[in-house]
């Protein structure tokens, strides 16, 4: 991770990102992705991704594009990587939730979630979160099967 201390502007941007996450539609989209969206196959994923005009499609695009934008802020130096990673585990949860499908998704959409995944590549803290969340997701998937 970066060695420089975060600036006041970095903190303001992190707080703005948090504020945007609490907007009503964004909260609904995040809730849907967290609770309802559990694609087992790439076909299930692409059904939602290609279901233009549906609420599910809007929620998926909103959550992924939000975290891709936030990751781009880090990748382009607009916000401290250390501060971002200390305060945001959520994008790695969503990436972990789709990890089992990413090779097939990338066969059709090579850059899908690319900025979040670039953070995983570049920063050990992001990689640790991503790997831990993949384990948690596997447990959650197993629990869903037995429920």
Image (spheres, helix red, strand yellow):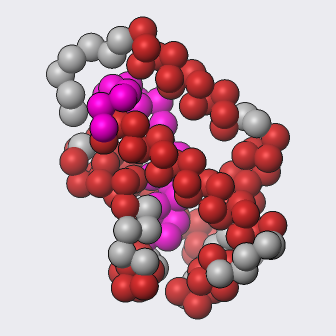
Q: Quadrant of residue 132?
A: bottom left
> Is 98 one of the magenta-colored residues?
yes
Q: Quadrant of residue 81?
A: top left
Q: Is residue 136 visible?
A: no
Q: Residue furthest left?
A: 3
Identify whether 88 is placed above or below 9: below
Relative image position of residue 119 (x, y in whole percent): 31, 48
Residue pictured at 57% horizontal, 31% vertical: 17
Q: Quadrant of residue 104?
A: bottom left
Quadrant (top left/top right/bottom left/bottom right) for the N terminus: top left
The foreground one among 67 and 136 is: 67
Q: Is residue 64 visible?
A: yes
Magenta residues, as a range?
76-99
Relative image position of residue 110 (x, y in whole percent): 36, 75
Identify whether 131 is placed above or below 38: above
Q: Main secondary structure of the magenta part?
A: helix
Identify whether 97 is placed above or below 8: below
């Amino acid at each position: 991770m970066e060695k420089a201390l975060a600036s006041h502007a970095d903190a303001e941007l992190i707080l703005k990102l948090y504020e945007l996450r609490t907007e009503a539609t964004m909260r609904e989209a995040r809730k849907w992705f967290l609770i309802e969206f559990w694609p087992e196959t790439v076909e299930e994923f692409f059904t939602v991704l290609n279901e233009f005009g549906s609420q599910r499609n809007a929620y998926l695009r909103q959550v992924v594009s939000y975290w891709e934008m936030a990751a781009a802020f880090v990748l382009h130096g607009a916000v401290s990587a250390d501060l971002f990673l200390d305060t945001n585990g959520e994008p790695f949860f969503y990436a972990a939730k789709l990890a089992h499908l990413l090779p097939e998704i990338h066969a059709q959409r090579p850059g899908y979630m690319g900025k979040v995944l670039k953070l995983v590549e570049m920063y050990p803290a992001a990689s640790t979160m991503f790997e831990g969340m993949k384990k948690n997701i596997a447990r959650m998937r197993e629990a869903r099967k037995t429920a």
